[in-house]
């Protein structure tokens, strides 16, 4: 099974999954979309109203801003993969609960294994905590650390910048670093591997 087929199978499983209560608010599961061999994978939080309606990630106002951010670095959606930590919409856009994040993580892990990206960009707190537990996004956004052979770069969720205009320049600045981060991901020496389970100290974050 190639990565296209593997990701298509995950998408099918998501549509009928009942492993957590979020399936009650699901109109369409949103497993993610994009290039199945992407060098860079963006991971947000979960589907909102429009995503739930359309079955696609980042299609509302935050999605339009994400498109603008990608354009800043001459990228398009088709060149990256975009997903979420939970694949079904939390009702009323509430935060996903720990048991929901845990239940859905197997899908995300399988997607990461299939796509095998060089760089993972986490968008928002819940996605960041999946890789860098206990970090503060205000302290670590835009910084890269190597986890299991990949660069993980936490960033604010685009919706946060829409709600807090003061964050917009931070988000744009972090995005502008992406080409350099991808280039250095190829040449950077392998550093000591940290895993999410080891709860790395955010102060040990390594810049590339
Ligand atoms: S959020 Fe994930 S684990 Fe929960 S029902 Fe949807 S696909 Fe299944």
Image (tube, rainbow, N blue to C red):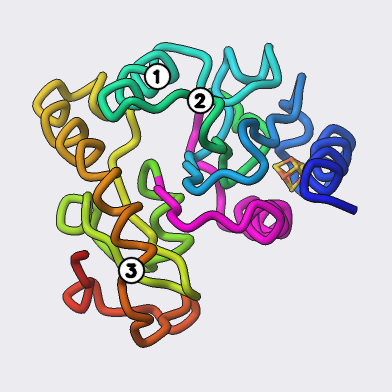
Marks 1 and 2 in Cβ contact (< 8 Å): yes
Pointer 1 or 2: first along the chain: 1
At mark 1, the secondary structure is helix
Q: Which residue is at 39% across, 27% downward?
A: 75
The image shows residue 20, relative to residue 166, as above or below, that is: below
Name the residue tied to disc 1. Answer: 67
Mark 3, residues whose alpha carbon is within 10 Å: few (<14), some, or many (≥20)?
Answer: few
Figure check: 105 above or below 123 = below
Quadrant for residue 153, please give it. bottom left
* Circle 3 residue: 187
Residue hosting label 2? 77
Q: Which image quadrant is residue 52 in?
A: top right
Q: Are marks 2 and 3 in contact (CB under 8 Å)?
A: no
| Residue at (68% x, 34% y) in the render | 88
In 3D space, how far apart are the residues under numbered discs 1 and 3 (Cα atoms)?
28 Å
Distance between the Cα atoms at labels 2 and 3?
25 Å
| Dot 1 alpha-carbon crowd within 10 angstroms: few under 14, some 14 to 19, many 20 or more | some
């Amino acid at each position: 099974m190639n990565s296209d087929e593997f990701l298509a199978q995950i998408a099918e499983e998501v549509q009928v999954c009942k492993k957590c209560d979020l399936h009650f608010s699901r109109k369409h599961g949103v497993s993610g979309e994009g290039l199945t061999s992407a060098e860079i994978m963006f991971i947000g939080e979960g589907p909102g109203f429009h995503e739930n309606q359309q079955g696609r990630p980042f299609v509302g106002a935050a999605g339009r801003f994400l498109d603008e951010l990608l354009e800043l670095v001459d990228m398009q959606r088709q060149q990256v993969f975009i997903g979420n930590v939970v694949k079904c919409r939390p009702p009323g856009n509430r935060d996903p609960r720990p048991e929901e994040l845990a239940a859905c993580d197997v899908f995300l892990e399988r997607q990461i294994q299939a796509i095998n990206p060089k760089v993972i960009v986490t968008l928002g707190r819940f996605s960041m905590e999946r890789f860098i537990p206990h970090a503060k996004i205000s302290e670590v956004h835009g910084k890269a650390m190597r986890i299991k052979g990949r660069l993980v770069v936490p960033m604010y969720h685009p919706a946060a910048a829409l709600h807090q205009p003061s964050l917009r320049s931070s988000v744009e600045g972090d995005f502008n670093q992406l080409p350099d981060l991808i280039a250095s991901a190829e040449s950077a020496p392998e550093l000591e591997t940290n895993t999410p389970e080891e709860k790395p100290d955010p102060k040990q974050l390594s810049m590339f």
